[in-house]
Image (cartoon, grey):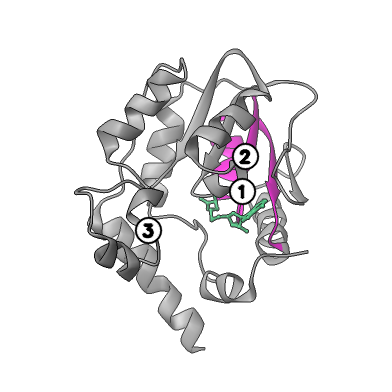
Amino acid sequence: MDIPRIFTVAESRHRIHNPISAQKLAELGESLALQPGMRMLDLGSGSGELLCTWARDYGIFGRGVDLCKLFTEQARQRAKELGVEDRVEFLHADAAGFVEEDTVDVAACLGATWIGGGATGTLALLRRSLKPGGILLIGEPYWHRPPTEEEARGCGCSASDFTTLPELLRSFLDLGCDVVGMVLASPDDWDRYEARKWIALRR
Ligand code: SAH
């Protein structure tokens, strides 16, 4: 059970498998006012950078679930490196339908919302693991300008796969969630994320 090998190879050198810098990831954690002892769930946790660094910096406890064996091993390794292996746990499993028995303070899915069938479905899935008043974190692409079908095909998707940012935020409000923070990927973040795949694929 694993993700298609092309993704594992292309992103074998990524610590963060998303167009977000280490600095922005830290800023995001900082903006959530995390307290020591808080519990967190991360679906599609990749190589574990979010949970490991936030466990180190804020003393949270976390569980990550990811379908990629290599990324999960890298996450466990990273936890050891940062000395937080007693606070974070990484499961190699399909996260579709995954719900925590003990509800958590923060439930996240960054750049893997197909796990719940899209941003809205993933929000509903994460909510099942969330304490009342807890925080949901969703990482999702959006269009700066809705593309033609042909342009979207050039990005390997369909125009209807994503919405604009105002529409995305509106969909969260429509589900009864308040939007309390936002960190946006810049063109630089996208370039770094994409270009890092090239050397991995070449090697
Ligand atoms: N959130 C991480 C990883 C994002 S990349 C980060 O920001 O670094 C998307 C991740 O989703 C990959 O690690 C991939 O292995 C994982 N994934 C894809 N399908 C999945 C599934 N059904 N269940 C769990 N993880 C999945």
Mark 2 nearby-residue class (10 Å; few <14, some 14–19, many ≥20):
many
Residue marked by disc 3: 158
Amino acid, disc 2: Asp
Can you say whether 1 is above or below 171 in the image? below
Q: Secondary structure at mark 1?
A: loop
Is residue 43 among the parts visible in the rendering? yes
State which region is magenta. 39-68
Can you say whether 18 is above or below 106 in the image? below
Does 44 lie within the magenta span?
yes
Percent of width and height locating residue 13: 52, 71
Quarter of the image where ligand 1 sits: bottom right
Disc assigned to residue 45:
1
Instruction: Please report the residue visible at 30 percent of the width from the left and 65 percent of the height from the top.
Output: 191
Going from the N terminus, do you reach mark 1 or mark 3 first?
A: 1
Mark 1 nearby-residue class (10 Å; few <14, some 14–19, many ≥20):
many
1 or 3: mark nearer the eye: 3
Quadrant of the frame with the N terminus? bottom right
Percent of width and height locating residue 80: 71, 52
Disc assigned to residue 42:
2
Distance in Å between CA atoms under marks 2 and 1: 5 Å
Distance in Å between CA atoms under marks 1 and 3: 25 Å
The picture quadrant where one finds residue 159 is bottom left
Pointer 2 with pointer 1, Cβ within 8 A = yes
Instruction: Please report the residue visible at 69 percent of the width from the left and 44 percent of the height from the top.
Output: 96
Amino acid, disc 3: Ser
Q: Secondary structure at mark 2?
A: strand
Nearer-the-camera pick, 184 or 169: 169
